[in-house]
Amino acid sequence: MKNLLVFFAICFLFSSLIYAENFRNTDEQLNEKTFGQFISWVFDGKKSPERVTIKTSNEWQQLSINQSNYAVWIGHATYLINNGDINILTDPIFSERASPIGFAGPKRMIPPVMNLEDLPKIDAVVVSHNHYDHFDIWSLKKLHKLNPETIFMVPTGDRKRLIKAGLTHVFEMGWWDTKQISKTTFYFTPVQHWSKRGFFDRNKSLWGGWFMKTEYLSLYHAGDTGYSSDFQKTYERLGAPDYSFIPIGAYDPRWFMKDSHVNPEEAVQIALDLKTPHSFGMHWGTFILTDEPVAEPPIRLQQAVKEQNLASDFFRSPKPGEILQLTK
């Protein structure tokens, strides 16, 4: 894995020479690492984590066309959600690699538990930010082809990419902007992260989480984030979500990743800040992106929940393909 990062190190060096920025985190945290720090991580002498078997479930095959109020973790940050009103897909990535090129970059350890053709009709797609493991153009184009009426919601600065790719019904949103689809209100909320896809566009588009609210059910998807006060502020403005989807992986080494990626203990604190009674993990077990052992995040999550004397169903990491019931 780290050998493949040599290519990206060259890209990192070139882009750092032409650094430009528009957006910042709410606390002015830039999440900027120098080229020297990046090289120190890539060539730190540590072996890449071993690929391991990730247990999946075929329970999703029991879904009926009229079933409602459920979620299925497809992998990484991709969740299929029915909130009792519409079908929602988060940060869809169905490609083999999370990379700008097809022959290098992080490769999936497990295939998506559902193929794009297995999905029900998707009414809304939400994208948290434009990194390749969350903003997969191939998947987004395929979703549009399968249902041209699907509505795509992306951060400010990313709409032009999808319009260029031939998508329609694409809406940009800034922090605290809202959009109503059927009976569901979508809020784009601040988190601590950054954006970049090419040499010239660092922080030229926004990043965030998605709060999805109906009269009967509230859901929150945190996207990709470091720990910050944003989650307390989200609770203060929007209340407690009934269910949250929070990243728990891609956190080591801490000196390099802390500003951008929470570890499991910080993920639990996010859930506490949101005052959400039930949370589900994501952002682990699909791609090897960082240094922690692949299977470590859910183990540490379980330990963190236990150490804080929280109920076992307060925050857990489901199997990909498992049906999660979303009822109050």
Image (spheres, helix red, strand yellow):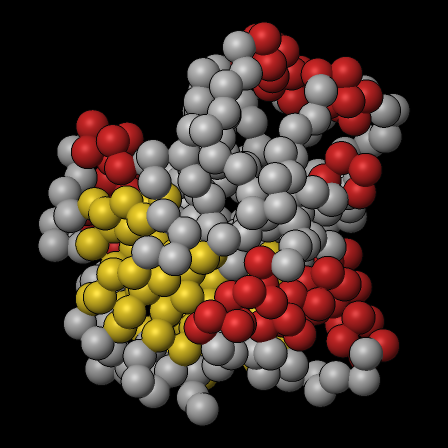
Q: Is residue 189 left or right of residue 52?
A: left
In front: 42, or 174? Answer: 174
Which of the pair 79/124 is nearer the observer? 124
Camera sees residue 286: no
Please state which of residues 117 and 20 is positioned toward the viewer in this rendering: 20
Residue drawn at point x = 64 percent, y = 39 percent: 29
- Taking the image as shown, residue 163 lies to the left or right of residue 255, namely left
Position of residue 9 measured from the top left corner of the image (x, y, whole percent): 65, 16
Q: Quadrant of the C terminus?
A: bottom left
In this figure, what is the number of numbered marks? 0
Query: Residue 106 location in percent, x, y?
Result: 57, 33
**Residue that appears at 38% across and 82% down:** 217
Whether residue 35 is visible to the viewer of this picture, yes or no, is yes
Q: What residue is drawn where x is 70% and y is 26%?
A: 33
Q: Is residue 57 above or below residue 157?
A: below
Q: Nearer the viewer, residue 162 or 24?
A: 24
Vertical side of 225 occupied by 220: above or below: below
- Where residue 291 sits in the image (x, y, percent)? 77, 39
Q: Is residue 139 above or below residue 180?
A: above
Q: Quadrant of residue 185?
A: bottom left
From the image, which quarter does the N terminus lie in? top right
> Hey, which residue is sitting farthest bottom in the picture?
328
- What residue is shown at x 43% (from left), y 49% (from top)? 128
Residue 18 x, y percent position in the rendering = 53, 10
Q: Is residue 322 above or below residue 295?
A: below
